Amino acid sequence: MKRIFFILFLIMGTNAHAGKIDVIKHSRPGGLIDRMNEVIARSLGDDFGEFIKVENCAQAKKVIETSKGKVLTAWPTEREANGSPCNLDNSHLLSTFSNSPYHITYFKDNDSAGELDNFTKGTDIIVGVWDSDFWAPPQTEYLQSINPNIKVVRYKSKPFRTALASGEIDYKVVSFPGNDPVLAIMDGNGLNPEHRFSDMGYSMMFVGNFSYDVQEVYKTTAWQERKDQTHAQWMPHLSRDEQVATVEKMLLQISEVIN
């Protein structure tokens, strides 16, 4: 009798979950990507099923490609670069999702750093960037196109957070400026707007195994009240195919710099 009830429980549980949308968690708990996936889950409301937790993007890719149920997730753009082991087939790229332009910041007590001429014309300028084999090369090219005298230093997480205050660097390039004053934003409107990387930020795609309009996420309270307000809608004015083509062009240009 107990076995019969157990089987009925499994069937009822499966039916209750049928048609729901699961969200894949594939990154560090509490990090930006993880928080964005929680926003997606909350935005689904009653359509949300459960979180599928995996250890990395390779496992997440397998879920997207093989799951019989509906799955969605926020996906860092750089994973779609040629040669990336986590590169998805374009059929899984539903749209762009979010983007935060890179901010050039300085330490509030460094008065000279607050002068734009110091950044663009100085001869002994040190700028810190995140130690990323993918993002650091295009950032370096962009910074040195503004001032060829700029020296770029790549930092791991912990020293990167303290480098400005300690005086090791004059500026740093970040997605989230925090309490540091912002000298400029790499949004394509200033410094060197003609440069190919002038409008580059840390970005994510919206991916899954079925058709879903990301505008449905943007309309929700969960999106409006998200913690990471500097991450905003990315290319919402373009069609899905135009978004994918634009991202592919950007990734190709970055690959050219890396290689």
Image (cartoon, rainbow, N blue to C red):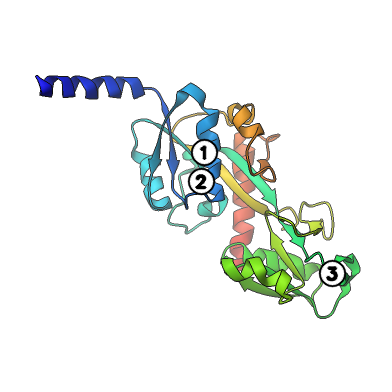
Q: Is mark 1 on a helix, strand or loop?
A: helix
Mark found first going from the N terminus, 1 or 3 = 1
Whether residue 204 is visible to the viewer of this picture, yes or no, is yes
Q: Name the residue under label 3.
A: 113
Counting from the top left corner in percent of width and height, residue 186 is at 76, 56
Q: Residue furthest bottom?
A: 124
Identify residue type, mark 3. Answer: Ala
Q: Residue 38 carries which label?
A: 1
Q: Which residue is drawn at 52% across and 28% down?
A: 212
Query: Dot 2 surroundings within 10 Å: few (below 14), some, or many (20 or more)?
Result: some
Identify residue type, mark 1. Answer: Glu
Q: Are marks 2 and 1 in contact (CB under 8 Å)?
A: yes
- In which quadrant of the rendered view does residue 177 lie? bottom right
Q: Distance between the residues labelled 1 and 3?
A: 37 Å
**Residue 159 versus residue 179 in the image, above or below:** below
Q: Distance between the residues labelled 2 and 3?
A: 34 Å
Left or right, residue 234 beside residue 63:
right
Q: In this view of the protein, which residue sits in the foreground, 175 or 180?
A: 180
Quadrant where the C terminus sits is: bottom right
Whether residue 131 is visible to the viewer of this picture, yes or no, is no
Q: Which mark is residue 34?
A: 2
